[in-house]
Amino acid sequence: MNVLRAPSPVRGVADVGGRVRRMPWLLETLGVLAAIAALLPAFARLADIADRDTRFADPGFWVEGLPQPTLPAVCKDHAAAADPLLVERLCAGTALRPERAVPRRLPPVLDEALARAGQAFLQPVQQAGQRVQALQLRQREGLGELRELSDTIGAIEARTRPFVERYELAGVDVRGPAPLVCADYAVGSALADAGHDDIARANALLLVAAALDGHAATESLADVAALPAAKLPAVCNGRSLAQAVSAAAGLMHDARQSLASSRKNEAMRTLLGTAGPQWAAAMLLGFALLVWSRRGVPPSRGAACALGLWAVAGWAARVPWPLAAHRAFEPMRVDTPFDSPPSGWALVLLGVAILWLMASLARPRATPTPQAPSSRLGYPGLVLATGLGWLLLLDLSAHGHAGNRYLGLYHQGHLWLGMAVFSMLLFLRQPIARGLAWSLSVAGEAGRAAWRRLGPGMGVAVAAALTAALLVLFALALSNMRQLTSELGRVWVIVGAAWFFFLRGDPLAQRLARSGGAGRSALRYLWPLLFVAGVLVAFMLLTRDMGPLLIACYASGALLGASVAAWWHERSGGTASAFLFAVALFAAWIGLTTAALFKAGSLDAVTAARLESLAVPFASTNDQLALVSWFQHATPAEGFGIGAVPWCGHASAGGCGGVPAQIHSDYTLTAIAGVFGPVAAWTAAIACAFWLHRLVRHHGRVTRGEPRWLRSAGGVLADDQAFLSWICVAWVVLTLCQLAVTVAGNLAVLPLTGVTFPFVSFGMTSLLVNMAFLALSLQVDVPPREDA
């Protein structure tokens, strides 16, 4: 049997003679308890002041009879003359008619929809008024118990008042809510004015149609779109056209979701008071499963138990199902009382867990390799990050922009699902490591066999054709799912880079590094990594997802520097020179990538707008960076504190102009600074970088990071930890670059790329992917005492 014992050319996975000690679980327990104790008072503070503006109050009425969506018809007839950014965000998938003159009055479809929407809002109030009049008539005629009639009238009026205030139906035109009437009047007058160009008027038509449909992107687009100036009546209450359209979109979305919103409001009122204990209980359950996964539990048995426990936890906490379409509220317990039955999804998960457990009990027990924590700070760091993120989202829900009022509720489901995935992968990490190494080995052998059969020329042509076909297929299928394409790009780079570095100790790779001239041998050695980077660039360009592309470009510098250092080490044997070569190459790569971003970024419309915002934030059409800069300068050194952050600035009651609405994802660093102060925000960023490094620091003590065999008491085993460790290192590199780009975007050093602060920002897909990789990184296999 051939044994691969070539020394590692890169010191990223070194110190083979060391061994990871079994760190006492008591130290981890103390770290977890300290992290929980540090944040629980902040959760309690939030519970004391939650819902002070009654944004989660139940209006007592549901809006029925709203018009059907009008945006597709307006897009079809008038989008050809509008701003391309609006067309991309609002009219994707709609066949547009050839460009024609924008009408001088509202199209009939919009006019009728506005009238019908206004009547739908007025109908509950009119019905309530008629009911009150009938009861008052009975009072005057002495029919029925007077006290009972008075109580009924008071209850109806008490329910009507919040509805009237919420939808601004008091003291305005009888046609409907103030923002809707204002937007109707303003757009109508703007269309009639011949002094405005077609683009501005077409933009106004699209935004009014989007507002009628309650489209989520209306507000952000109204802030950046070119809109015509219009004389606004008193009913607008000082709003501009953009503010009126944004407010109309918010109330229409709320009205279309009024019944669901009532259930969400009830859940939010409960969650604001119980979020702290729920988060602490979830973290303790995850920690218990983490400790149990190190006790030699068979992988399938442990994963099945973890799934069942999280299903029960979801039922107990009444967690909303995170995969529901259109953010529908589908709690895992149907009603609030504990005797309420579980939802269908909870029963499905519990049934799968039971069947999985029964199947695992029927099979012979396989003894897994002993495991140890990669860092005693690993899980406590996760506790702090998830607690900080949920705390920020709850504060934004309770006191920030009204459109974000359910962020904390949505994140409850995201966090539950992320912890469930994390816990199951703790048990399945060893089978996953073996499966990845085996499948990629088979794929590599199949590729080499096909290469020998087809020959170099035909092999390259076939590989290029298959790659292009798969790229186009994925791009067409996922073109409007940027959250998914971003994470798929990350996973591709992580696995591809890990596979390259995993095989860099193979004798064939070493011969390639030493053979031929320097340039030729470097190219032959690096071409797999260049292929991974090329596929990523093509995929991101096809899907027009530029944020992950920038992060991948920066991370590619680190990976390329390490690979070139490995090549130089194989050729010359020098360690110090290889290290200096890698550092110099990485620094040059960062400079070139940043220069290319500022030079070529204008080729993409979205990137060009963000570059303009970076260059002239106070004069740009996109004022988000200006708002963030103002917010950062206005924040005191100790932060504003829980519940006191001016998320809406000093805007009037009709709007929220303090910080961008997406502060929960793009500007998380600024949000941390607003609540806890700039020092705390920088501490969080630096601590996150330090924590990520600690996760992989000890991986080099248990593996060389190359294909080899290990001798144990039971025989000779493959080193399954090697490839898994490279995956963890590649994930940490990309995540550190993501963190750096996020911080730079908040500080106006780089244009904002739409990427999240790891484990803290809002976003289900990003959280799930990071949780999965964290589960693979948090523990390492303890190698046998002797290796072959």
Image (spheres, rainbow, N blue to C red):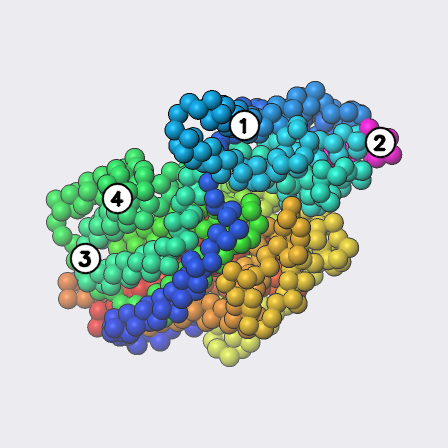
Query: Within the image, what quadrant is residue 752 found in?
Result: bottom right
Q: Which of 77 and 68 is in front in this view?
A: 68
Mark before the other along the chain sequence, 4 or 2:
2
Task: Give the secondary structure at mark 3.
Answer: loop
Instruction: Name which residue type carries label 1.
Output: Gly
Q: Give the residue at mark 1.
A: 129
> Does 209 appear above or below 575?
above
* Picture coordinates of residue 300, whole percent (x, y): 22, 49
Query: Within the image, what quadrant is residue 720 found in?
Result: bottom left
> Does 194 appear above or below 374?
above
Q: Give the residue at mark 3.
A: 297
Dominant SS in magenta: helix
Mark 2 and mark 3 in contact? Answer it, CB < 8 Å: no
Bounds of the magenta segment: 192-204
In the image, farthest residue toward the right: 195
Q: Give the residue at mark 4.
A: 338
> Does 327 appear above or below 502?
above
**Crowd band around label 2 with a 10 angstrom C-alpha radius: few (<14), some (14–19), many (20+):** some
In the image, farthest residue toward the bottom: 576
Which numbered marker is on residue 193? 2
Mark before the other along the chain sequence, 4 or 3:
3
Evaluate whether residue 363 shows in this view: no
- Does residue 620 appear left or right of residue 164 in this picture? right
Mark 2 vs mark 3, CA separation in Å: 74 Å
